[in-house]
Amino acid sequence: MSVSVILPTFRRPEGLRAALASLMAQSRQPDEIIVVDNDPAGSAARGVANARAVARCKVVYVHEARAGVANARNAGWEAATGRYIAFLDDDEIASAVWLEALMESAATLPADVVFGPLRGEALDAPGGVRGGLAQRLYSRPGQSTDHRLDAPFGCGNSLVDRSAFILGDTPFDPRMNVSGGEDDLFFAELKRQGARFGWSARAHAVETVEPRRTRWRYLLARSFAFGQGATQSAANARPRRQAGIAFWMIIGLGQMLCYGALAAVTALIRHGSAAGWLDRSVQGAGKLFWVEAFEPRFYGEAAPVDSTGQA
């Protein structure tokens, strides 16, 4: 069965190089790798050409000049020809059996959508509560055996059998281009269509985290944006779910107050516990303040660029 791996990238040449190297070392080679360059300047073209020269599978370069994470994923989805679509981000490195494990889990569970574990590795690992929060946000631990899931995770390190769903060429919502959360809406639609979600315990990947992404401001913005997703999903539904919006705002208020108090108390005693409560509290604030005016800007041209040219 044919598999396409979609790899969006934005001004992250070293990350792209590492991600491509991990894909070309797979025990089960993909039928094609679709690299979507979301930099208007097309900065990833040379790196993709170098990879194509040594790859054992087809490597396709797609230049999506319109900034935004949803635009990039849609461009990759439209270009892909495989029945199965695997997603790997340009800050992720797949283990050698990653794709083989995802495919095996999809067949044996069986499942239409499969997710694998992620381990966050910070290049400049902070300590204390901030370190615990970073580990919580950039890692996806799970059980050591394959099993069915009740709810989905995010796109990075996932596999979708697109023949199981009725989807157009652009299934990711462009309204989420700069804030993220396009994958939440995508998987919510798959769930609405009856998706069977699964966990592939052997499909390991590492997410490399550069220093700017472990700063307090960035970490709290990530938690806040993740919390916004629940309320925004209700707001962006067709038709709009007003009761759902009210429900998640009430939940968010409770989480912000209760978990915030727990975070303050445990910060002096157990940093790991404090990080968890802080994450939940900030997510609660995101559920409450979910409108566009409060959305953090993470992707595309809205993302900050450091001295190396990386977003």
Image (spheres, grey):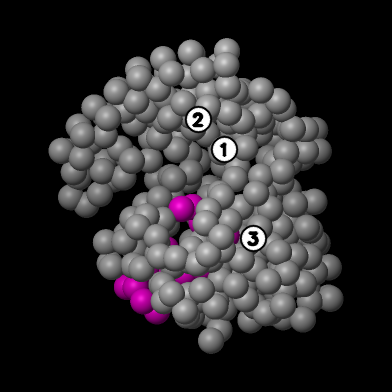
Q: Is residue 172 left or right of residue 219?
A: left
Position above or below: 60 against 224: below
Q: Earlier in the sequence, mark 1 or mark 2?
A: 1
Q: Is residue 3 above or below residue 133?
A: below
Name the image quarter holding residue 191.
bottom left
Type of the residue with mark 3: His
Residue depicted at x 45% and y 34%: 225
Q: Which residue is mark 1?
A: 136
Residue 306 in sight: no
State the quadrant of the C terminus: top right
**Marks 1 and 2: CB-CB under 8 Å?**
yes
Which label is found at residue 276? Answer: 2
Q: Earlier in the sequence, mark 3 or mark 1?
A: 1
Distance CA(mark 1)–CA(mark 2)? 7 Å
Q: How many residues crowd mark 3 within 10 Å: few (<14), some (14–19), many (20+)? A: many
Rounded to the nearest angstrom, the CA distance separating label 2 from label 3 is 23 Å
Say above or below: 212 vs 202.
Answer: above
Element class at badge 3: loop
Identify which residue is drawn at 59% across, 45% down.
139
**Which one is nearer the viewer's eye here, 88 or 66?**
88
Magenta stretch: includes residue 280: no
Considering the numbered disc 2 on the image, is that residue within a helix, a strand or a loop? helix
Q: Residue 306 at what x, y percent from top left?
A: 75, 33
Name the residue that disc number 3 marks: 204
Where does the magenta region start and end?
Answer: 153-170
Q: Using the numbered discs, state the Cα–Cα distance from disc 3 to disc 1 in whole angstroms.
A: 16 Å
The circle drawn on residue 43 is none
